Image (tube, rainbow, N blue to C red):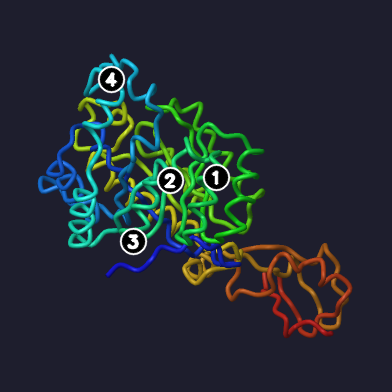
Amino acid sequence: CLPSLNFVQEEGSGALTPVSIIARDSVRTIRETVEVAREMIAWPRYCSVKDCGADCVKFQKSELEYRFTKCALERAYNSPHSWGNTYGAHKRHLEFSHEQYRELQKFSREVGIFFTASGMDEMAVEFLHEINVPFIKVASADTNNIPYLEKTAKKGRPMVISSGMQSMETMRCVYQTVRQHNPNFTFLQCTSAYPLPTEHVNLRIITEFQKEFPDIPIGYSGHEAGISVSVAAVALGAKVVERHVTLDKTWKGSDHAASLEPAELAALVREIRTVELALGSPVKQMLPCEASCHSKLGKSVVAKKTVLKGSELTLDMLAVKVAEPQGIAPEKIFTLVGKKITVDLKEDDTITDEMIQE
């Protein structure tokens, strides 16, 4: 049984919490086949999403009559990516049934990976709540849907909220709306374009979100090509990373060109874990691993010339060199001026604390 994900930001713990990696399945833009979805969750030709290191596989769940108006469903849809003559026919072809979702959830549990979905309307959220998903993803199109946010927040489940197509003013409103009912949520910086041009990624918004909303973790949902931008997001402090995944970028559907194939997903996870490790501690100090270098190259205060016992030290008596043995650190050289030396010194003799009269 997988534990629940927790996005509550504990004070002082942000840098230590592992980044959650969400693999968003692009199967909904292929065809209505659970077999393909299962293959994407556990790629037999490569490795499973879990083996690649992702924490969660995510789909999209819609109850079409609640998400779209009749006119929207009946409008002609002639896109190269279309699976039907109307938008409704196209969406119905792609939508999994409740039974199919339960089957995929069961399969994900057997594989050992979180399973969830974006609730694309209020009824979809009700279904996801019913099947006990670990968190509910709020797609960018619903981020400014305040009634939806209130109802979803009241479910009490963790929420991952994308920010595509929104302003900072809207995100402040979203924060206040959700925070009233549910402290367990995260915002993802996101730009809603597929594939996303690099110049419109705007990773700096991650740091702006961190300033605006310091009590929640901030993440990144990427639609760009490659993995370097997503890795950079982690370096900026993203605690959740969501990327589309596919078995073949050439498949029909706009999502696939912006998706990662298995080898890329595995590489992304490796690089994220490397960056997490490299972020390390914010405390600047000499580390044990630096001891060898310091013993060979670290400098100390030494006598620049002969100095007799009892002399009051002046700056022209002192120099900084690599010495054996090591002595007083160079940054303390000015504190020695005016103090008396308790031993005779020859040129290049190391000066230690024991030689200084307090």
Give the structural element (helix, strand or loop) at label 3: loop
Give the structural element (helix, strand or loop) at label 1: helix
Query: Is 285 in front, or is 182?
Result: 182
**In-image side of 314 versus 294 (left or right):** right
Query: Is 183 in front, or is 228?
Result: 183
Disc 1 to disc 3, how far (Cα)? 21 Å
- Label 3 crowd (10 A; few <14 / some 14-19 / many >=20): some
Q: Do the residues labelled 1 and 2 touch (CB within 8 Å)?
A: yes
Disc 1 to disc 4, how far (Cα)? 29 Å
Q: Which amino acid does label 3 sit on?
A: Asn
Q: Are marks 1 and 4 in contact (CB under 8 Å)?
A: no
Q: Residue at x 81, y 72 (%)?
A: 336
Q: Which mark is residue 122?
A: 2
Q: Is residue 64 above or below residue 37?
A: above
Where is residue 114 shown, x and y percent of the image? 30, 58
Q: Mark 4 points at which residue?
A: 86
Q: Residue at x 55, y 38 (%)?
A: 144
Q: Which amino acid does label 2 sit on?
A: Glu
Q: Earlier in the sequence, mark 4 or mark 3?
A: 4
**In-image side of 115 versus 276 (left or right):** left
Q: Mark 1 points at which residue?
A: 147
Q: Which amino acid does label 4 sit on?
A: Thr
